[in-house]
Image (spheres, rainbow, N blue to C red):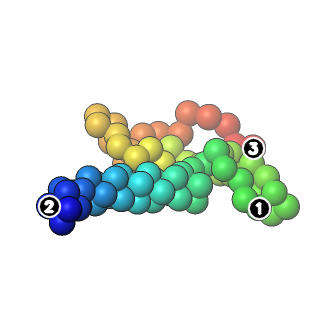
Amino acid sequence: MLERLEMLIPLVSFIGLGLGSAALYLLRLALCSPDVSWDKKNNPEPWNKLSPNDQYKFLAVSTDYKSLKKDRPDF
């Protein structure tokens, strides 16, 4: 009986690690994404205040955000 429980320890730990990682990623998306607006009164459209140098993607493989120039009008 104890041997069977010991075999479940890695399974439970990997499932817990996966659930924790998913929860942290969803928290990051909710707090750092320009598509989400928590304060509708003071900042109803946060995506308009982004500059081209703001990196909001989780992973940018070939984009150097420091060298980008502004190519859109101010609102």
Badge count = 3
What's the distance in space between the residues labelled 3 and 1, CA to CA?
18 Å
Disc sitting over residue 24 in the figure? none
Is there CB contact under 8 Å for labels 2 and 1?
no
Task: State the residue at coordinates (40%, 59%).
Answer: 20
Near-viewer residue (17 or 33)? 17
Task: State the residue at coordinates (56%, 33%).
Answer: 71
Near-viewer residue (14 or 66)? 14
**For mark 1, what is the residue?**
39
**For mark 3, what is the residue?**
75
In the displayed structure, would residue 23 be above or below residue 61? Answer: below
Label located before the other in sequence (2 or 1) = 2
Mark 2 vs mark 1, foreground winner is: 2
Mark 3 vs mark 1, foreground winner is: 1
Query: Which residue is farthest bottom?
Result: 2
Q: Position of residue 66 (x, y in %)?
A: 37, 48
Disc 1 residue type (three-letter):
Asp
Q: Is residue 64 left or right of residue 38?
A: left
Quadrant in which residue 5 is drawn: bottom left
Q: Residues within 10 Å of mark 2 (few under 14, many from 20)?
A: few
Asked if residue 54 can be seen in this view, the reply is: no
